[in-house]
């Protein structure tokens, strides 16, 4: 049986998410972006317009935020980890975050006040590399656990940032529990994780705020291209931190006329989609190996903070088969003449994979109609990683791994 993309409209009863939305107001995100702008490595990542692809697919515009350029780390995750660590240090040293720019954060005075700390985390690669990089910048230690099946290339990239890193024989969610348990036994340590659960929500909230820099840049860049706002956003989700951050930011920014936002998960780890199908506001966990090409999305338990935002403001939830992400990697890497090339990794291409299925596969004509995608639509995508595992990238783009079961023609 061929794998299929599954989708469901959001019919979940509304809840009071004022506290969660408050994390992602334009005022809050402006502070976050000012923090990131203080880093010597800071440059806004490109927003690539694909006008020829948009015309070919029959929509007004397709715009891809290319995070392969972020801080030289080939992925967006460092935005969340670095900001959360700075917020933690501001608490420990009694400073306001506005006083902790890069220069101050890396100063001998702050290091002396903080003392020696170890930052623990679990990751498939990108978040852990970001935490390791940020810890290295401030002269601190990091310990990173990666779930079974993780890429050796990503492991080595984390170790190059000075972290103690290892691949463990458990899935992502159990690796998170391991990092938490090990931190509890280690003096002067803290967990910097991009997922939240009851009793651990402050730091994940800071991580989500850190992702606001990317969303804010994209909004500025769309306006610079003469587009008032995106009409549609397709955003990928693992635990949902990124999806909640992007949804929260654009919902706050355009309260009277928010974009239609679609949350895209790997079918092997589609806890948010299953929760939306259940439809009563509770979350459904997905266990097991969570085996998918989209390693960054292989998370089976939802972030409790972001879920409150998504259940109230996302329009659709999608469970995406691996072939759709692989197809999007190929389309972005081999563009129509005149469009820019975008090197997007497996997880980075998930949102595009969903969009391209909707626009080319007649089986999803009803989904396209429900999305109200037409020649006026301005679609924003986030390619959250480049080829962070070059071997996988070549297997997909060069060798044709994960082929499309049925070729879609327009």
Image (spheres, helix red, strand yellow):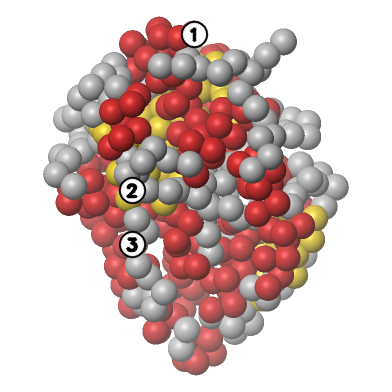
Q: Nearer the viewer, mark 3 or mark 2?
A: 2
Image quadrant containing the N terminus: top right
First of labels 1, 3 by sequence position: 3
Q: Position of residue 287 (x, y in %)?
A: 74, 30
Residue at 46% across / 16% down in the picture? 409
Residue count near mark 1 (Cα–Cα under 10 Å), binned few <14, some 14–19, many ≥20 = few
Residue count near mark 2 (Cα–Cα under 10 Å), binned few <14, some 14–19, many ≥20 = many
**What is the total number of numbered labels drawn onto the structure image?**
3
Residue 17 found in image quarter: top left
Residue bearing mark 3: 44
First of labels 2, 1 by sequence position: 2
Extreme residue toward the right, this view:
169
The front one of 68 and 147 is 68
Residue bearing mark 2: 48
Give me the disc on residue 31: none
* Element type at mark 3: loop
Residue bearing mark 1: 363
Relative vertical location of residue 326 with respect to residue 386 in this rendering, above or below: above
For the residues labelled 2 and 1, the Cα–Cα distance comes to 29 Å
For the residues labelled 1 and 3, the Cα–Cα distance comes to 38 Å
Relative vertical location of residue 330 with respect to residue 217 in this rendering, above or below: above
Q: Position of residue 98 (x, y in %)?
A: 31, 72
Residue at 40% across / 84% down in the picture? 104
């Amino acid at each position: 049986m061929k794998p299929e993309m599954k989708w469901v409209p959001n019919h979940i009863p509304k809840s009071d998410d004022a506290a969660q939305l408050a994390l992602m107001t334009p005022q809050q995100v402006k502070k976050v972006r000012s923090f990131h702008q203080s880093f010597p490595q800071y440059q806004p990542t490109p927003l690539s317009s694909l006008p020829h692809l948009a015309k070919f697919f029959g929509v007004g515009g397709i715009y891809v935020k290319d995070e392969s350029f972020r801080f030289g780390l080939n992925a967006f995750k460092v935005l969340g980890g670095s900001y959360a660590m700075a917020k933690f240090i501001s608490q420990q040293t009694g400073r306001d975050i506005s006083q902790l720019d890069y220069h101050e954060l890396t100063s001998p005075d702050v290091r002396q006040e903080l003392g020696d700390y170890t930052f623990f985390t679990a990751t498939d690669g990108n978040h852990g590399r970001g935490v390791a990089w940020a810890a290295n910048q401030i002269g601190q230690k990091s310990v990173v656990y990666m779930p079974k099946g993780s890429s050796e290339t990503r492991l080595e990239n984390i170790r190059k940032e000075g972290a103690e890193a290892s691949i463990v024989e458990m899935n992502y969610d159990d690796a998170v529990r391991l990092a938490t348990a090990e931190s509890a036994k280690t003096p002067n340590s803290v967990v910097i994780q991009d997922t939240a659960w009851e009793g651990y929500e402050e730091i994940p909230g800071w991580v989500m705020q850190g992702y606001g820099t990317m969303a804010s840049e994209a909004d500025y860049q769309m306006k610079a291209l003469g587009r008032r706002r995106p009409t549609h956003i397709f955003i990928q989700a693992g635990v949902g931190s990124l999806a909640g951050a992007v949804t929260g930011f654009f919902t706050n920014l355009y309260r009277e006329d928010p974009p239609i936002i679609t949350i895209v998960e790997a079918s092997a780890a589609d806890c948010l989609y299953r929760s939306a199908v259940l439809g009563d506001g509770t979350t459904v966990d997905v266990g097991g190996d969570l085996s998918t090409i989209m390693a960054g999305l292989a998370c089976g338990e939802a972030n409790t903070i972001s879920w409150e935002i998504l259940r109230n403001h996302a329009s659709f939830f999608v469970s995406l088969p691996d072939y759709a992400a692989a197809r999007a990697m190929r389309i972005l890497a081999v563009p129509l003449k005149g469009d820019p090339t975008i090197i997007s990794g497996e997880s980075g291409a998930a949102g595009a994979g969903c969009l391209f299925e909707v626009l080319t596969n007649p089986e999803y004509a009803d989904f396209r109609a429900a999305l109200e995608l037409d020649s006026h639509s301005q679609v924003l995508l986030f390619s959250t990683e480049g080829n962070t595992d070059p071997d996988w990238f070549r297997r997909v783009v060069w060798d044709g791994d994960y082929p499309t079961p049925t070729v879609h023609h327009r």
